Amino acid sequence: MATIHRTTLEPTKLELLTGWLPEQSWYEGGGRSPALVRAGGFRLDDPEGEVGIEFMIVVDTGGQRPVAYLTPLSYRGSEAKDIPADALIGTSEHGVLGTRWIYDGDRDPVVRSQLEALLRGGAEPQMQSESDTPDPTVVVHGAGPGDGTSKARIIRVLRRADAVEGPAGSVVTGWTWPDGTGVRGVVATVEAA
């Protein structure tokens, strides 16, 4: 189980994401820099205890209307050799753990493996900011296409978090808009290949 440390992170996750997000093809803000606020999310545990896994939802309040984005993150104690270099969001100094390499979790094999485990019922979502605490608000709607053992499945992380119902083979979680309105929506799906 992951331990959540109450300490500093320099630069912060939001600062790193502010520089990284505009470079992504799915970012809707055009050429402007986002104004990000944390809005929700959850964690998964790495069975090996080496990689921190967080599915953070941030809201960009800098445009004409707020837009919510899912930003899966992986935290590692050293540079990863099995992840493309361009998946690195940045490094940050953790007040307890030292330098952390923060990657786009959608491109991290440990994150992908644990997301697949969650969709099969083999992993339990954890609270975003509490150690060893399951998050009952994260709902998994079945394994989706196939019997759960087929390799012919595609797991998609939905980068735009929209308030929609979850079909079979989806992960649903909640977040809060800047005006305080709570919503729920799909953040990942599994589809037949």
Image (cartoon, rainbow, N blue to C red):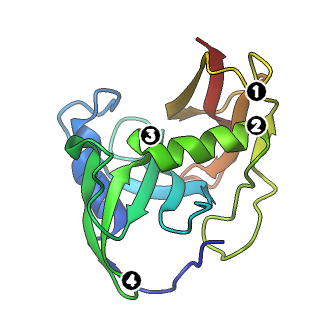
First in sequence, mark 1 or 3: give its number: 3
Please report contact status of discs 1 and 2: CB closer than 8 Å, yes or no: yes
Residue 96 drawn at (x, y percent): 40, 88
Q: Quadrant of residue 76?
A: bottom left
Badge 2 is on which residue? 120
122 and 9: which is toward the camera: 122
On residue 97, the disc is: 4
Q: CA distance from mark 2 to mark 4?
A: 31 Å
Q: Quadrant of residue 115?
A: top right
Which type of secondary structure does the marked residue at label 4 adopt? Answer: loop
- Would you place residue 10 above or below residue 88 in this image? below
Residue at point 49% right, 59% down?
38
Residue 21 drawn at (x, y percent): 29, 43
Please report contact status of discs 1 and 4: CB closer than 8 Å, yes or no: no
For marks 2 and 3, give the one nearer the viewer: 2
Q: CA distance from mark 1 to mark 4?
A: 36 Å
Q: Residues within 10 Å of mark 1 (few under 14, many from 20)?
A: some
Badge 1 is on which residue? 148
Badge 3 is on which residue? 106
First in sequence, mark 2 or 3: give its number: 3
Can residue 33 be seen in the rendering of this structure? no
**Residue located farthest toward the top when viewing the structure as drawn:** 193
